[in-house]
Image (cartoon, rainbow, N blue to C red):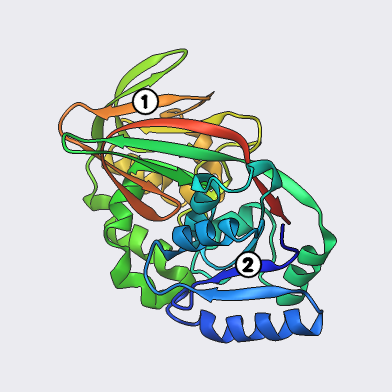
Amino acid sequence: MSDEWFIIANSFSNSGKAISLIDKVVKKLKEEKIKHSLNLTINSGDEIDLVKRATKNGYNKILAIGGDGTAQKVVAGIVMQQSISLKKMVFALIPSGTGNDWAKSKNISSNLDECVKALKSGKIKTQDVGVATIKSANEKKTRYFITYSGVGFDSFMLSKIDKYKWLGKLSYLACAIMNFLKFQNIAVRILTSKTEINTNVFLLGIGICKFTGGGMQLIKKPKGNDGLLNITIAQEFSKFDIIRNFFNLFNGSIFKERKVLTLTDSEVKISAKNGDLVCQGDGEIFGAGKIDYSVIKKGLRYLS
């Protein structure tokens, strides 16, 4: 296997502001004599193809420069490729996105010197990888996530987020404030290995890490590498409940609300009582339909 880092960089990350960071990263790696190969994405999804190409050529160390979307797609590529065992793959991230929720959850600094220090340290940690299988009348597709996947308000908010991206790190908060009263609870059936729940949800989240949606704290004390999905169900929320708990979504106090239920399981199946559920993962719309969730225990090896 190669001792070089195969870099996958999203030059469009953070509204194109990542371009200057990419130049700085390359310069720093050269100064530190860290071998690397730079590869830029052009279209969304290029990350997966680049990882497959990298592993076919013997690269087992993948460095991503970008935000949560870039990290999610690179990790998806790592899981999907079949050239190198997951136990030999290593992932690292230099955050340059809007939310950077995965990096925040893992205490990964956006400071370039700290990131390069982590690359040289060789301290490898492990994390579970979430799997979402979305089944509709016409197709079945599988998506992977490393932070959070959900249906309900968060997916609804993502459909509105583009018009707020110019606000940078405040975009998620601004989008939530402007749209939370427009959302209607969704009637769902939730099936785990232990229980069945039929309820109306404001938010239904499946998580591995603490942060999502630009700093929302929707997952209660996740271990992240125990082979269990952390499930948060905010149910039967009235408009008053939404207003009363709005900022609790960001400060972690939402779990004190009596209408919020938390569970853990290695598998969970979710379906809407009427129509399809729109599912998002790590800030990307995955699709719509019935959703089966599972987990790859310690499927990701990363540097922090």
Residue at 84 percent across and 61 percent down: it is: 121
Q: What residue is disc 1 on?
A: 269
Report the disc number at residue 2: none
Q: Earlier in the sequence, mark 1 or mark 2?
A: 2
223 vs 148: above or below: above
Q: How far across and how far down the image is residue 166, in percent?
A: 38, 78
Q: Which residue is mark 2?
A: 6
SS class, disc 2 = strand
Query: Which type of secondary structure does the marked residue at label 1 adopt?
Result: strand
Residue 137 placement (x, y as % from top left): 16, 34
Q: Quadrant of residue 23?
A: bottom right
Type of the residue with mark 2 = Phe
| Residue 52 at x, y percent in the picture | 51, 56
Does residue 214 show up?
Answer: no
Along the viewing direction, whichever of 196 and 57 lies nearer the viewer: 57
In the image, is 229 to the left or to the right of 143?
right
Amino acid type for the residue under numbered disc 1:
Lys
Q: Report the Cα–Cα distance between label 1 and label 2.
A: 36 Å
Taking the spot 72% from the left edge, 57% from the top edge, the residue there is: 1
Answer whether residue 171 is visible to the viewer in this image: yes
